[in-house]
C-alpha cells in the first residue's frame, strides 16, 4: 500500500529495521533513509550534499529536493517529498534514466556548470550508495586541532 506522508526523525545512525512512513535523517552521516513510498518495503538511501539531495526542515515538516527516482528497484517508483507529503511523479524511460545518470556524473566531477538533478526540474535519481561516514563536528575539530 503506497505511503502518503513521511514523518521525519533526526537520528545519529539508521536503525537496523526501518519503519514505514518515517524519513530518517542523519546529519552526522550526511544521508537520509526510508522505506520506498510505493509500499514495496525496499530501503532507499539518499546522500546529502550540494550535488546530491538536499532537505529543508521548516520547523514542522521536511521537503527533499530533487525528487526520489528509484530506478534500480523493481518498482521504479518516482516521487517528491514536499512538506512531509508524497507527490507522485512520472516514470522515466531507460533513455531518460541514462541521460540523467550521465548528467549527474558530469556535475559531480565538476566538469559542467549544471548541478545534479537540475534538468529537468524536480527530478533526480535515487541510487543506493554505501553510507557516507563522516566524523561529527566535535570529532573533526578535535582531529584538526590535536591530529
Image (cartoon, rainbow, N blue to C red):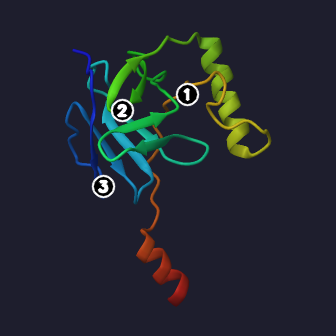
Q: Which residue corresponds to the image point at 59% horizontal and 12% vertical from the top-left?
A: 94
Q: For the residues carrying marks 1 and 2, which lies nearer the camera in this image?
A: 2
SS of the residue under disc 1: loop
Q: Which residue corresponds to the image point at 50% horizontal and 81% vertical from the top-left?
A: 143
CB under 8 Å between callouts 1 and 2?
no
Q: Which residue is mark 1?
A: 124
* Residue 147 visible here: no
Instruction: Decide if residue 20 is on the left or right side of residue 67.
Output: left
CB under 8 Å between callouts 2 and 3?
no
Question: Callout 2: 10 Å neighbours few (<14), some, many (20+)?
Answer: some
Q: Decide which of tag 3 and tag 1 comes sooner along the chain.
A: 3
Q: Which residue is mark 3?
A: 13
Which residue is at the far bottom? 146
Q: Position of residue 66 (x, y in %)?
A: 52, 31
Can you say whether 51 is above or below 89 in the image? below
Q: Position of residue 46 (x, y in %)?
A: 45, 39
Q: Which residue is mark 2?
A: 83
Q: Position of residue 38 (x, y in %)?
A: 31, 18
Instruction: Decide if residue 125 is on the left or right side of residue 63.
Output: right
Q: Decide which of tag 2 and tag 3 comes sooner along the chain.
A: 3
Q: Which residue corresponds to the image point at 28% horizontal and 32% vertical from the top-left?
A: 6
* Mark 2 to mark 3 CA distance (whole Å): 23 Å
Q: Which residue corresponds to the image point at 45% horizontal and 24% vertical from the top-left?
A: 70
Question: Callout 3: 10 Å neighbours few (<14), some, many (20+)?
Answer: some
Amino acid at each position: 500500500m503506497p505511503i502518503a506522508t513521511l514523518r521525519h526523525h533526526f537520528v545519529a545512525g539508521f536503525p537496523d529495521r526501518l519503519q514505514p512512513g518515517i524519513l530518517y535523517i542523519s546529519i552526522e552521516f550526511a544521508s537520509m533513509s526510508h522505506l520506498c513510498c510505493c509500499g514495496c518495503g525496499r530501503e532507499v538511501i539518499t546522500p546529502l550534499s550540494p550535488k546530491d539531495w538536499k532537505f529543508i526542515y521548516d520547523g514542522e515538516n521536511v521537503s527533499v529536493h530533487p525528487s526520489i527516482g528509484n530506478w534500480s528497484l523493481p518498482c521504479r517508483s518516482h516521487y517528491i517529498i514536499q512538506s512531509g507529503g508524497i507527490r507522485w511523479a512520472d516514470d522515466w524511460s531507460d533513455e531518460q534514466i541514462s541521460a540523467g545518470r550521465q548528467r549527474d556524473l558530469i556535475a559531480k566531477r565538476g566538469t559542467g556548470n549544471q548541478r545534479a538533478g537540475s534538468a529537468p526540474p524536480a527530478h533526480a535519481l535515487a541510487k543506493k550508495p554505501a553510507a557516507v561516514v563522516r566524523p561529527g563536528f566535535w570529532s573533526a575539530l578535535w582531529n584538526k586541532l590535536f591530529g
